[in-house]
Image (cartoon, rainbow, N blue to C red):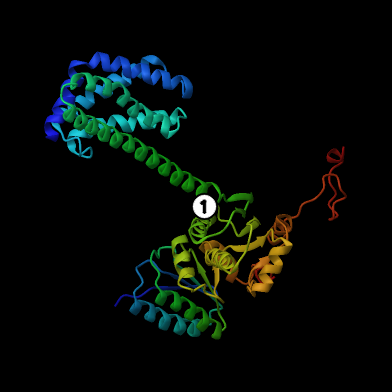
Amino acid sequence: MERIPILKMGDSLLVSIQVDMHDRLAMTLQDDLTAKIVATHAKGVLIDISSLEVVDSFIGRMLANIAAMARVLDARTVVVGMRPAVAITLVELGLSLPGVRTALNVEQGMKLIVPHEEGADARREA
Amino acid sequence: MARTEEMEISDLLTRHESAILEDWVRIQAREGRRSHSLSDDDLQEESRTFLSLLRTALQNGQAQDIQGRDWAEVRRFLEDLSRNRAALGLTPSQTVTFVFSLKEALFPQLQRHLAKDPSQLAAATWSVSTLLDRLGLYITEVYQKGREELISRQQQEMLELSTPVVELWDGVLALPLIGTLDSARTQVVMENLLQRIVDTGAAIAIIDITGVPTVDTLVAQHLLKTVAAARLMGADCIVSGIRPQIAQTIVHLGVDLQDVITKATLADAFAVALRRLNLSVQKLGAPPRSSAAASPAEQG
């Protein structure tokens, strides 16, 4: 069965979604990711959706859910690389993903979750 | 009967072409003295072309049906004529006069030609008159359509022109909004902004609403949508240029702008943006805040 790979980098987990998301895949990702956060004691989750061209309300909700679950497990989630069309769609669907951090690309996203980047968090909170 | 009238008129046009043409150009020139300045040569040429096209169409087609295939040439000619004259700044009535003045040239000829048969004269006169009226109306329609195209194109251009995204600093975008924000514009604004965020990798976008005359709940909702979309792309938005009345309106309407950073002026917003990027603006030659002093050369 198809799975989305979850990579561990230091204290964070890196998920890069490269295929079309369908509902089953999204549920599997949710299961795998929560299990992995617990197993690795990860403090951050970075989800790269730059290859995702179509996002429906279910996938949007799933992203929000993953972020909420990660927060419960004490890991912060950053969603990076959202395309303009996807952003507009999500906003039109009324899903503005409150509580999910966002960044333009993986590089800037890593700055948000890697702890030794001081100042970045402080600025973010301000 | 109609068929023979058309033949009749067509015959008349063939036989007395030069006389009709001469009369017609003279009449047009007389009208033209008052209203516009087309050169006589152009007028002559256009009139000749139109007469010959008209004759051909009359030989083949029905006078009642100027939308038919036989009249395609005449229609094309009139479209060009209408467009050219509009470009020269002539009013529609001046343009239509081109066709209507042909009546004045044609009727005396008809009269002479059919003097012995009054009933046919009346029928032919009526037939010519309605035909030329139809052609005249067609010119007006074309003119109108041209105007409408112009208006819709300008609307489109205005939409594009009125939503520039400017880069204030490396990583800081500004979006000065001018005019009312409706759904269509919000869409364009949002797309432009998000695309520029991708292109420049900007982390902060300042939306300046100084030029937005009124902010109602709908406009506020559109603003919030834009802010939310930009946030999803990883850029923070600051809304600036909020005039006192607008601040009052927003509060009275109960619009919740809690999640958005708002500033009174673009300058304030820019200062916030620079601070976020750990930058500051300093007066040249002012004593530097840090102990690392500027070089004496700079002071001089």
Residue located at (41% from left, 16% from top): B39
- Callout 1 secondary element: helix
Residue A77 in percent (x, y) is at: 53, 75
Residue B157 in percent (x, y) is at: 49, 45
Residue B19 in percent (x, y) is at: 26, 14
Residue B212 in percent (x, y) is at: 63, 57
* Residue underneath mark 1: B199
Q: Chain of mark 1?
A: B
Q: Answer with left or right where residue A60 lies relative to residue B221.
A: left
Query: Which residue is nearer to you in this view: A90 or B197?
Result: A90
Quadrant containing the N terminus of chain B is top left
- Mark 1 residue type: Asp
Residue located at (48% from left, 79% from top): A66
Up the image or down, B172 lies above or below A33; here it is above
Q: Is residue B110 visible?
A: yes
Quadrant containing the C terminus of chain B is top right
